[in-house]
């Protein structure tokens, strides 16, 4: 059902009246708002420090839209993983892959669909691929032992480099303590309606091996989910079961008062037989007669995939960080090696069994076609950065960054009876060197301005080894290019409780070598490379609150100009990268919180985002002004939290409301002024809006925390993501059914 303009007005008014998110802060407002004495009031006003600008600053003063998330509070309320946590952040959309990994994240309508548009950082280390030939999905570090998770809105091209046009997900692991031992062990047990029993176990340990000199931090997790999608073709219930485990560890060596060395590692592994996706029509009667547009083929939580689609995901990271205090500045060296591999089988019987019949009629009929694919990368990064001391007069940062990445992508279509129908292997290589710097002038203690530049030189190459009638091998291709990014911001603090900022910043994703495809006459039908896309963001924001800290707010308005928008196109039957002309996004985000009483806190966030094509794009079938896919125009979350005591034991109850507005996928097609029709590259589908309600409660008994939760209380069904296809089955990811569970944590 479509929301009316009046509904949107009510939602906007409500968003501006109540505040955002469980465990979510953009203003440093402490959520335990029982401020009945001076100690509690101090806690209420506790300053939140972030490193969004690559130096420590107060969250209220930093001239960037930043959301700080306490992932432990979300876990206690039943939310685990980026796909469940990030929808509470205004202006952020998650494209759910139906797996615990591989979920794309888009911010402010910047739906970067090839190379990553949102980059993950584990502390100071960027993790992820820089090319279009592996995977652009960011790393999910929410199950590590985090102090906080920071969400930085983009572009962040000057301080963080390529692939940060949408923003940054920064997973700040807990620093090893040199003073005392602490730790925790927890069990999160739940049951999903129509599914089964889910288990998540976590353990954290942190403390000194040699007091004041050597400390360690260690965390591990293991998750076993029973799934909730049934395969009616194979007769398998809960076929989207998965096992997911991993952890991280670090050693901190305080060599001297001025020198410290940190060695850290991270590992994640996930295996599953199927995904939480189901088949559906993208239009009335498409492929399955009698079923309407956007309706499931088999059932709301049923799939008809004809073969098991097992997959395995593995990610690992090793890092070395050296910090040396020179007095006038801090010198930081950050070195990392990282690997990611993802392998999956996919049932592509429709339409490729028919293609096999066409090319190999002597063995027809062909009964199945399963794609076995593996992709990933090996990557090395090195950053050197010099950060001046914070003196309130003139501050600067200067640095250099180097990356060397080898990517792999192998696809083999296994047909029954066996045929050499399709095999493709395209290794790639990416190398980059960047120099960057920023400077901040304080004209007065309350007014300052910053300027920054980043120059990047990179090279990219790719080749294609292929067999079968559907694709031909292609020669090695290489390009090189350089890009310059900038930022400029001003800040003004008229009072201790209010901060204004204005920001202009640019970002980019690297271009790359392309497959050189020829037509039957030997003429090229693809460009030898795709260009870097770049965008410039204009943003104005205000952060503040009342002197007693009970009311806090964070509001930002932005306009983004996106040029040479990277897209995927089909040339001679092969998907290659290309560039659209331009797109834009504008919007308003708001987060507010209010302590209604000493025990009752109201929270809310909301965003209006208007992202659209800036020109007609024939390759996409997208007319100028059409809304970009994968971002809702309206989004909001509301919450209440009540703190009280039971027999002098701290307790709480709370609830949240999540709203996701109508969201388009695909494109609509259009006819130009000459009467030529350009069909959509993917069919247009408008996903309905939906609302989810969640409840949680908890109590602390000595060293133990007990929590109970219900997510999706009313068992609402809707599409969280939909992938339309003109030639095969469209697929979508439905909302997770009502889940009831509890968490027990022992803190020691």
Image (cartoon, rainbow, N blue to C red):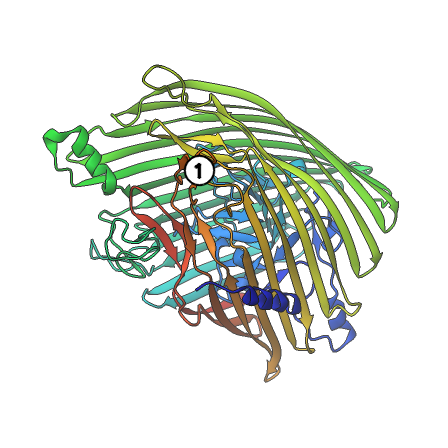
Tell me how many marks there are.
1
Q: Position of residue 715 (x, y in %)?
A: 40, 69
70 left or right of 267? Answer: right
- Is disc 1 placed on a helix, strand or loop? loop
Question: Which quarter of the image is occupied by the C terminus?
Answer: bottom right
Q: Where is residue 564 in the image (x, y as percent from the top left)?
A: 55, 32
Q: Residue furthest bottom?
A: 647
396 left or right of 264? Answer: right
Q: Which residue lies furthest to the front in this view?
A: 674
Question: Toward which corner of the image does residue 569 lie, by quadrant?
Answer: top left
- Residue that appears at 58% across and 66% down: 11
Question: Which quarter of the image is occupied by the N terminus?
Answer: bottom left
**Toward the viewer: 500 or 152?**
500
Q: Which residue lies furthest to the left in this view?
A: 362
Examine the rendering and report whether any part of residue 434 can be seen: yes
Q: Position of residue 138 (x, y in %)?
A: 50, 44
498 left or right of 27? Answer: right
Question: Toward which corner of the image does residue 228 lie, by quadrant?
Answer: bottom left
The answer to whether residue 352 is above or below residue 498 is above
- Residue at which label 1 appears: 620
Question: Toward which corner of the image does residue 297 lie, by quadrant?
Answer: bottom left
Crowding at dot 1, Cα within 10 Å, few <14 / some 14-19 / many 20+, comes out as: many
- Residue that appears at 84% across and 57% down: 494
Q: Where is residue 278 in the image (x, y as percent from the top left)?
A: 32, 54
């Amino acid at each position: 059902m479509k929301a009316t303009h009046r509904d949107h007005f009510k939602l906007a008014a409500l968003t501006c009246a109540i505040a955002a998110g469980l465990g979510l802060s953009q203003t440093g407002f402490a959520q335990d708002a029982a401020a009945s004495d001076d100690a509690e009031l101090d806690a209420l006003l506790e300053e939140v420090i972030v490193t969004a600008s690559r130096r420590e600053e107060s969250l209220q003063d930093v001239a960037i839209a930043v959301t700080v998330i306490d992932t432990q509070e979300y876990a206690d309320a039943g939310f685990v993983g980026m796909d469940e946590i990030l929808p509470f952040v205004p202006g952020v959309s998650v494209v759910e892959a139906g797996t615990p990994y591989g979920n794309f994240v888009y911010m402010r309508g910047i739906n970067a669909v090839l190379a990553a548009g949102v980059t993950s950082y584990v502390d100071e280390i960027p993790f992820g691929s820089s090319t279009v030939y592996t995977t652009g999905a960011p790393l999910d570090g929410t199950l590590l032992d985090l102090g906080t998770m920071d969400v930085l809105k983009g572009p962040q091209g000057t301080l963080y480099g390529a692939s940060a046009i949408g923003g940054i997900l920064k997973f700040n692991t807990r620093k090893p303590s040199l003073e005392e031992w602490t730790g925790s062990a927890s069990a999160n047990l739940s049951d999903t309606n129509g599914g089964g029993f889910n288990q998540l176990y976590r353990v954290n340990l942190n403390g000194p091996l040699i007091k004041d000199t050597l400390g360690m931090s260690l965390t591990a997790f293991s998750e076993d989910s029973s799934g909730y999608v049934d395969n009616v073709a194979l007769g398998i219930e809960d076929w989207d079961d998965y096992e997911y485990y991993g952890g991280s560890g670090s050693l901190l060596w305080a060599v001297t008062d001025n020198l410290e060395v940190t060695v850290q590692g991270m590992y994640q592994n996930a295996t599953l037989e199927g995904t939480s996706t189901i088949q559906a029509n993208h239009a009335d009667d498409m492929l399955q007669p009698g079923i309407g547009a956007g309706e499931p083929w088999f059932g709301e939580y049923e799939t008809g995939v004809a073969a098991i689609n097992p997959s395995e995901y593995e990610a690992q990271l090793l890092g070395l960080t050296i910090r040396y205090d020179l007095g006038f500045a801090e010198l930081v060296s950050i070195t990392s090696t990282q690997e990611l591999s993802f392998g999956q089988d996919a049932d592509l019987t429709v339409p490729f069994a028919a293609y096999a019949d066409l090319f190999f009629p002597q063995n027809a009929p062909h009964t199945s076609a399963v794609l076995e694919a593996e992709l990933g990368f090996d990557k090395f990064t090195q950053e050197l950065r010099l950060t001046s001391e914070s003196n309130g007069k003139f501050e600067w940062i200067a640095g250099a960054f180097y990356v060397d990445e080898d990517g792999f992508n192998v696809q083999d279509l296994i047909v029954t009876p066996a045929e050499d129908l399709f095999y493709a292997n395209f290794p790639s290589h990416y190398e980059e060197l960047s120099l960057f710097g920023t400077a901040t002038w304080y004209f007065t203690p309350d007014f300052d301005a910053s300027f920054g530049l980043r120059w990047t030189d990179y090279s990219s190459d790719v080749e294609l080894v292929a067999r079968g009638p559907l694709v031909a091998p292609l020669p090695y291709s290489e390009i090189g290019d350089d890009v310059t990014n900038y930022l400029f911001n001003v800040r003004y603090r008229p009072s201790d409780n209010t901060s204004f900022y204005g920001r202009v910043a640019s970002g980019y994703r690297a271009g790359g070598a392309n497959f050189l495809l020829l037509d039957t006459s030997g003429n090229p039908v693809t460009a030898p490379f795709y260009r870097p896309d770049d965008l410039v963001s204009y943003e104005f924001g205000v952060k503040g609150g009342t002197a007693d800290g009970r009311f806090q707010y964070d509001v930002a308005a932005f306009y983004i100009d996106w040029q040479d928008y990277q897209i995927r196109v089909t040339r001679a039957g092969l998907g290659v990268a290309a560039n659209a002309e331009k797109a834009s996004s504008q919007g308003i985000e708001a987060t507010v919180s209010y302590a209604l009483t000493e025990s009752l806190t109201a929270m809310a966030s909301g965003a209006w985002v208007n992202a659209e094509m800036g020109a007609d794009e024939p390759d996409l079938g997208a007319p100028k002004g059409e809304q970009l896919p994968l971002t809702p125009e309206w989004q909001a979350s509301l919450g209440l939290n009540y703190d009280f005591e039971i027999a002098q034991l701290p307790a709480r109850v709370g609830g949240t409301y999540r709203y996701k507005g109508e969201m388009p996928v695909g494109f609509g097609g259009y006819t130009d002024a000459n009467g030529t029709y350009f069909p959509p590259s993917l069919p247009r589908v408008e996903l309905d809006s939906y609302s989810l309600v969640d409840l949680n409660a908890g109590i602390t008994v000595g060293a133990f925390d007990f929590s109970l939760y219900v997510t999706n209380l009313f068992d609402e069904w809707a599409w969280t993501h939909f992938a339309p296809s003109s030639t095969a089955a469209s697929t979508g990811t439905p909302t997770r059914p009502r889940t009831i569970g509890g968490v027990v944590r022992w803190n020691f």
